[in-house]
Structure formats: C-alpha cells, structure tokens
Amino acid sequence: MVRILLATASRWATLVREIVALDERGRPTFQALHHHTTAGIHIVYYAFDILHLDGRDLTVEPLDRRRALLKRAIAGTPILLSDALPGTPAAIRTAVRRLGLEGVIAKRRSSIYQPGKRSDAWVKVKFNRRQEFVVGGFKPNATNFDSLLVGYYEGSDLYFVGKVRAGFTPALRAEIFRRISSDRTPRCPFVNLPTNATRHWGEGITEEEMLKLRWLAPRHVVEVSFVEWTRDGSLRHSQFVGVRDDKPPRGVRRERP
C-alpha cells in the first residue's frame, strides 16, 4: 500500500495498489516486470482498495463502500481501477482461463479490511495450467525425496523444466519413491543441465548442485500444475497433481496454447 496525493482533487489517500506490466495484447506479464523487459510492454498502475481518505479511516467500511469511494477518489487521475468482475463464478472462471491468466481474488462484498490477517472473506483462486512431464531425477532428503526433477522431450532429447516440491503428502512421497528408486542411473538424462547459475525461483541447477542430485532413467510420467512458463523455459510455482501411468515418456512434449 502507499499514501499518495491525488493532485486533481488535492486529497490524500492510502491506496492498496499494484504496478502491472501489460503485453501487446493487454495481458499482464509477471515475467516482463520481473526481468525489467520494456519492448512492447506498457506499465500501468492499478488501485484495488482505499484505506484512508483525507485522514478518515476506511478499513472498517464494507468493501462495496470502499470501492465506491476509491472510484471517485481516483477519477481524473492516471490510476486505473481494478474493479469487480461481472457474471457468475462459472462465467468468470471460463473467461479467465480463456485469457490464460493466473486466477482471481474472490472477496465478500461486505468484508472489512484486516491488515496482516488471513480470512475466508478473501480467497485466492488460481486457474493454473497443467500438463504431463517426465521424471528424470530427484533431490534426496533424509527419508526419500525433497523434490522431483521433471522435463519434456524434443525429439530424442529430454529438457529439464523444473523441480516439483509442492503437492505431496508424506504417504504419497513414500509411494512415489518406491516406484522410482529402482530406476537410478549415474548419468543425468537432461540435455540442458547444468545451467550457468540458479535463476529466479530456483529453476536453474548449477554444476555444484548437480552433485547433490540423483538421476533416474526417464520411465515415469507425472502431471504437474503450474502458474506459467518463465522466460527461460521453466515452470513457475509448480505442484504435483498425480502419476500418469497411461502416458509413455517419449510422447511427452511441451504443450503450447
């Protein structure tokens, strides 16, 4: 949040806002913002809540009331309003998925602002992408594995795309480890490892880290959900969904919209 002077009205306001990079199609791109990419990118400033206005505390006002005050407060300024989406939940879900966006924040219209607190009045709803990937290794822990190393085929080459750590229960980790532990191999199956350095979100694997990993013959396929592909061709915020015994490893390719 930030306290700003709304010059057109000479009013002080505390806004909850976000700087967003939009691509040439008008879609938000986290990658461009993170990597400071400017070609074909338009930077905009969205406000989605107002907490104070001219010294008045608005945090105890219901969301609908705050939205109405916010709309009037930023009228005539370059600040854009992040307004509520119209339609049913099903229609919103369909539209967001069609646009390839990450998800939405669902908020009760009567909710007050509770800084630093988790509340079921505000819920993050993600519409992640999914696809199958081949397991080519794992990072071990004291019991079985900390994360799976996954990738896809291009021709006969297996390309590493990320470490999958989330989405496992202790029982599931044990079961998957039982499946893969007999397929150990001394040689890394990924043609694009090691990378020069560990990049953002830890998707890269350095030569030093390679020594700590264990490699597998690429015989197992898992389904993974993720937010997006990074600029470097890796997965962002990946999560295990399930084992796919029905998919042959050699048939796993990168799926493109």
Image (cartoon, grey):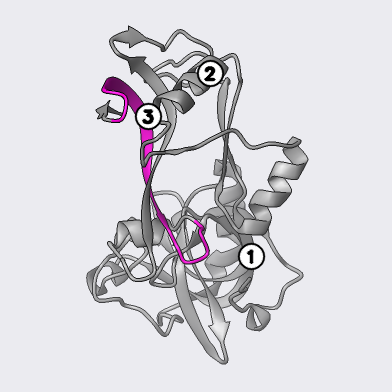
- The CA span between labels 3 and 2 is 13 Å
Q: Which mark is residue 156?
A: none
Residue 163 visible in the picture: no
Q: Secondary structure at mark 3?
A: strand
* Sequence order check, earlier mark of 1 and 2: 2
Residue 68 visible in the picture: yes
Looking at the picture, how far across and down is residue 246, in whole percent? 76, 70
Label 2 is placed on what type of residue? Leu
Looking at the picture, how far across and down is residue 92, in whole percent? 70, 43
* Sequence order check, earlier mark of 1 and 3: 3
Q: Is residue 104 above or below residue 23?
A: above
Indicate left or right for 80 with 252 as reference.
left
Residue at the disc numbered 3: 16
Residue at the disc numbered 1: 131
Residue at the disc numbered 2: 63
Q: Tell me the residue at 57%/30% (across/down).
A: 123
Residue 10 on the magenta span: yes
